[in-house]
Amino acid sequence: MSEVFNKGQLAAQAARSLNNVTTKQKNEALLMMADALIAATDEIITANKLDLEYGKQQGTSSAMLDRLTLNEQRIAAIAEGLKEIAVLPDPIGEQLQQFTRPNGLNIRQIRVPIGVIGIIYEARPNVTVDAAGLCLKTGNSVVLRGGSAALHSNSKIVAVLQQALQQSALPAEALQLIEDTDRASVTELIKLDRFIDVIIPRGGASLIRNVIENATVPVIETGAGICHTYIDADANYDMAAAITYNAKVQRPSVCNAMETLVIHQQFANEHLVALCKLFAEANVQLKLPAAYLANIPEATAVTEADFATEYNDYILNIAIVESLDEALTHINRFSTKHSESIITNDAAHAARFLQEVDAAAVYHNVSTRFSDGFEFGFGAEIGISTQKLHARGPMGLPALTSTKYQITGNGQIRQ
Amino acid sequence: MSEVFNKGQLAAQAARSLNNVTTKQKNEALLMMADALIAATDEIITANKLDLEYGKQQGTSSAMLDRLTLNEQRIAAIAEGLKEIAVLPDPIGEQLQQFTRPNGLNIRQIRVPIGVIGIIYEARPNVTVDAAGLCLKTGNSVVLRGGSAALHSNSKIVAVLQQALQQSALPAEALQLIEDTDRASVTELIKLDRFIDVIIPRGGASLIRNVIENATVPVIETGAGICHTYIDADANYDMAAAITYNAKVQRPSVCNAMETLVIHQQFANEHLVALCKLFAEANVQLKLPAAYLANIPEATAVTEADFATEYNDYILNIAIVESLDEALTHINRFSTKHSESIITNDAAHAARFLQEVDAAAVYHNVSTRFSDGFEFGFGAEIGISTQKLHARGPMGLPALTSTKYQITGNGQIRQ
């Protein structure tokens, strides 16, 4: 049997006993995991150096190497993350519904663990700890499949966490790392319905697409964000400038950053030049409809293909529209249904936007950058779902749970 | 462009305007659809006769032909079903959460339509109407792909419903039927992520497996049920006999019928012969562990493969165990996680069973046959989900909805 099959099976067996641990036992295990990480700081840094050396040999970019780097401070922050998960309320066992039928059946719907969660991700070794903590807190086993770039770091971290689990009431087998970084191990994992209940891919578009196209295990799709901000005719310039600047410039590499700014012609006539100057000063490369290039010499012409591109970079498309309807049509056409915002003082326009734009999060007079589990107050985030089933938008702990109906009676039979 | 692509696109366009119709408009449309079906009774029966003739030529079984048959009474019952959906509460717009963050952001989570739902099913033409009614009630477009055996009936029914929709406030394009009954049209539909938001297969195991293995659109898995009843050592004989007889015999062809009866040895010693006599009198073919065959001459030996089989027929496996633990192990090994029941007077055993058995519905002193949207009081059922994401167990109208976060502020930007 392969590594994937064996570890999937162990995780599934562990899931059954995980179902019986208490909240207190889970929280204690999380704190033990945090302490173990701190205690193993030197070993983890040593393992991480092997990944960094390999990365340098491979010509990995300095930005990527920085993401991959673990030092004392970062390991402390990662351990702190586990402690924060430990103090969050436990959703497992929560009663969602309870009712009695005329025939006397008592029906309760309660939250239960999903079972075994497979997480497929790329470079960052902090995801290893974060995903393990969130899954164990919700009583799930987790099978991690990280990228080859972080293999030494991930292997060491998981070994440390498993040792901590062995001292806890939780089964150490509930945490598994697939060390085979060949692509075939991903393919095997996403088809392992027998043991894996859900796959959450965290990474770039091609990783996610590969999982969706080949998985037979249900997938929670996360990530892709072509986010828009629409500035309405009557919007206040200062607010519009502050929000759109924040949405584009504060952290362009993330999924909730703005890719396209849609502007009502009336607002554009008055403010486009000033707004573009602001973005240009922040080194944002601007793409505009050809008709507007004369006034904005630093911009280039925007194309249909640009509107369909998630840059995650200092690049911004601008579309000019003549009405709210035209803005809605543009957004519903190009949106990846992640996060969309309207800036307006017109309450009726805001209401229509919030109703008619089909996205996980729709905003009025707010930056799209707030689409985030921590900003929403969930205390945790396993990702941002861009699909419509199970969970949509920022996913906190309840997104890692399923439900079960418990029905009690006294001999009822169906007529 | 193919039929599937064109109809998928029309449905997706219609979904956008469906998002803006009121509950009253949807309910009126459902009533108009019901009236139109009644008015078209003769035409529908004529179309249905073509399917029945074709079925007879193909040597279709009389049971299958009966399921396919539409007559005045059945059409009236189907139309009545639409009227019942019309009076159900509309889940769309329901506020699930509302909270204000310290920075003043007001966050609401509301129920919204999923968008476009694809339903793939087999012979029964009543599913055509039922699925259309449930999807439209929840503001979703629906693309139906029925089997070739019911093509004439389905085409006529959908034409009648679309005509009714044309008189209503709902777009007629929200209801689409794929008339291409080649298997390739299923393959195309389940990969049409661009327009279809979820696929619900309703049918036999091979249909469902094909969809799960090939879909890129998210799937809600329904149906497969290897359901168990466990009779504990101290169970009351009369209750155990009544419940297990009901679970097996009342309607063996359905997914919530019992396939395997697990009996504590102590109960079996006293009651196995009497219980088997009861089943044998109802023409249930019994499969028992070899050691018990001497006492039950009408039974044959049960195998591991039998325990993994969903018969949907008058066949029953029996397993004899020495403890609750052994029963739990057997059930968690062979269960398809649909519906499982314990019969016991021991409250601690019942609690352990309800906690430790991993299934959509777990019962104490109740027949598994109650796993049903109507029996749960949902007033509707689109199927019984056996997966753990999105919806688990009997699915009523809320299972056909997604959610959206609406966030309002006054210029908040992320720090």
Image (cartoon, coloured by chain):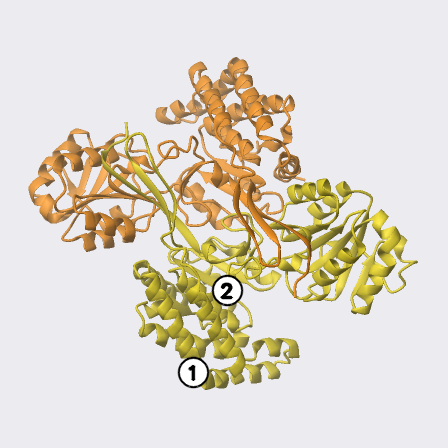
Chain colours: A yellow, B orange
Q: Position of residue B57 (x, y in %)?
A: 44, 23
Q: Mark on residue B220? A: none
Residue under the point 66% across and 41% down: A356
**Residue at numbered disc 2:** A120
Q: Position of residue B127 (x, y in %)?
A: 47, 29
**Residue at numbered disc 1:** A40
Question: From the image, which quarter does the N terminus of chain B lie in?
Answer: top right
The quarter of the picture where residue B175 lies is: top right
**In the depicted structure, whether residue B77 falls above or below residue A113:** above
Under mark 2, the amino acid is Ile
Residue under the point 39% across and 48% down: A403
Secondary structure of the residue carrying tag 2 is strand
The quarter of the picture where residue A26 lies is: bottom left
Q: Pointer 2: residues within 10 angstroms few (<14), some, or many (20+)?
A: many
Q: Chain of mark 1?
A: A
| Front in this rendered view, residue A299 or A155 | A299
| Front in this rendered view, residue B88 or B12 | B88
From the viewer's perspective, is B66 left or right of B228?
Answer: right
